[in-house]
Image (cartoon, rainbow, N blue to C red):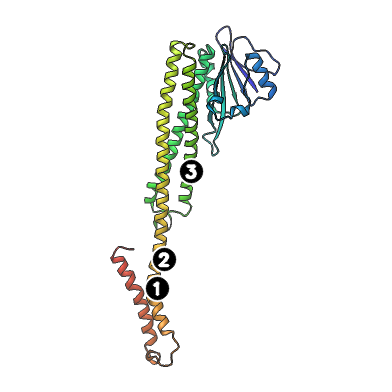
Amino acid sequence: MITVHARSADGRVIEQPLGADDPLPPGTVWIDLLRPDEAERAHVGRLAGCELPTREEMREIEASSQLYVEGDGIYLTTTVIARADTPSPEQGEITFVLTPRHMITLRYTEPRSVATFAARTGRQPELLASAEDALLGILDAVIDRVADVLELIGTRIDALSTRIFTDSLDGRGFGGRRKPDELQDVLRGIGRAGDLTHKVRDSLAGLDRLVAFLTSVTAGRLGKEQKAALKTLARDLRSLNEHAGFLAHEANFLLDATLGLINIEQNAIIKIFSVAAVAFLPPTLIASAYGMNFAHMPELAWEWGYPMALALMVLSAVLPLWYFRRRGWL
């Protein structure tokens, strides 16, 4: 699907679809291709005077294949996060192509930042004053979305921290312990937060390389305000990288804490079995002694032999429990 964003004579931004054989409307600044087929990709390439990369070329991991200059076009490919607020976040590639007259986005995913920028251009037509302004504007929207995702991760990590360190004081479950599957749910939550943080850090690394490359190849092409905006994007990326690193550290800390709590609860269970084994060992010994089939056992003919054996077994079970509790082992 091809969508063009053009500025009309009165300064308004007009958004409209473009057919595979349609010419570009006058004033077109931004051309957005979402999951284009081969005919649509070739058609836009002919209209813009450049060759757009294929999906396989967009997935190349070499920096020389993602960031390069060819003719009058600057090609910038990076990964972005989509559906970050769902249980299944996605990571996809998006290519920005900057030509003297147009800014082209080529993507096979639907990040919220693109829709946000498209809506913003309707309120602020000056964002499409030139192809360079459009590129800087959409990069700003992408970075803003990354900041929102990091805020979402921070909120999730705070909630998990509360469940780990505070909910244990509520005394829920048998004996004041957690329900068996509660810490498993916490582990899953930490795993999801860590996976999303990893995707965000990967996206930030790509954006950082993109902005650095764009700064070097557009030194004489951008105006003063555009250069200042590009420097602001670079500063934002540095701060977001630091924040993402902090969140990754927090996720690892919560993972260690959760595994530690699981280990403590497992040790408590083993402790109960150990105490029970020790408590029932003396009664078992007494019962074994009086269960031997010897012909001459003095207590067998005694009238009070059976009550005495029962009393010995109860006393031998109670005394170890009393001793353990006095020493603080229970």
Residue lying farthest to the left in this orientation: 326
In which quadrant will I find the N terminus?
A: top right
Residue at the location (40% across, 59% down)?
267
Q: Nearer the viewer, residue 302 or 114?
A: 114
Residue kind at label 1, given as amino acid type: Phe
Q: Residue 126: x, y in percent? A: 50, 12
Q: CA distance from mark 1 to mark 2?
A: 11 Å
Count how many numbered circles sit on residues in the image. Answer: 3
Residue 8 in sight from this viewpoint: yes
Mark closer to the chain start, 1 or 2: 2
Q: CA distance from mark 3 to mark 1?
A: 42 Å
Q: Which disc number belongs to residue 191?
A: 3
In which quadrant will I find the C terminus?
A: bottom left
Mark closer to the chain start, 3 or 2: 3
Q: Quadrant of residue 284?
A: bottom left
Residue kind at label 3, given as amino acid type: Gly
Mark closer to the chain start, 3 or 1: 3
Residue kind at label 2, given as amino acid type: Phe
Q: Quadrant of residue 50?
A: top right
Q: Residues within 10 Å of mark 1 (few under 14, many from 20)?
A: some
Q: Residue 33: x, y in percent? A: 62, 22
Q: Circle 3 — which element?
A: helix
Residue 158 in sight from this viewpoint: no
Q: Which residue is mark 1?
A: 280
Q: Which residue is mark 2?
A: 273
Q: Residue 201: x, y in percent? A: 47, 33
Q: Is residue 141 above or below residue 265?
A: above
Q: Nearer the viewer, residue 22 or 237?
A: 237
Residue at the location (44% across, 21% down)?
233
Q: Circle 2 — which element?
A: helix
Q: Residues within 10 Å of mark 2 (few under 14, many from 20)?
A: few
